Amino acid sequence: MTYRGVVQNGVVVMNKGATLPDGAVVEVSLIEEDGSPFQTHPAFGIWRDRTDMTDSVETSRRLRATIEHEGMNE
């Protein structure tokens, strides 16, 4: 079953008065403004097959270091 809602003050408020029982396990997906699922965006998953980016934290750290280093050389 799929329900929709909107985040208000950090809490998902369900549309049309839908209620779920306490303890229900749910999955939340972002929806684009045009109503399409976030995962359908053309950029979603474009780096999925990159073998040099297996650790996202390390990749982010490396990219930030590169940008900072290049900025110092200007």
Image (spheres, rainbow, N blue to C red):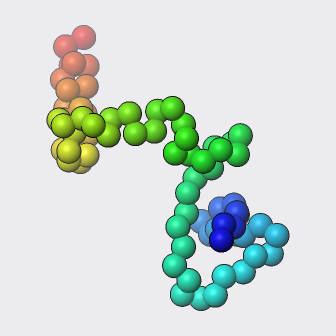
**Location of residue 62 (image quadrant):** top left
Residue extending furthest toward the front: 1
Residue shown at 72% from the left, 70% from the top: 14
Whole-percent x and y of residue 37?
A: 60, 47
- The answer to whether any part of residue 8 appears in the image is no
Residue extending furthest toward the top: 74
Classify the position of the C terminus by image quarter. top left
Residue shown at 52% from the left, 67% from the top: 27
**Location of residue 3 (image quadrant):** bottom right
50 and 60: which is toward the camera: 50
- Position above or below: 36 against 25: above
Whole-percent x and y of residue 59?
A: 22, 39
- The answer to whether any part of residue 25 appears in the image is yes
Residue shown at 32% from the left, 40% from the top: 48
Whole-percent x and y of residue 47?
A: 32, 35
Residue shown at 62% from the left, 69% from the top: 11
**Location of residue 10 (image quadrant):** bottom right
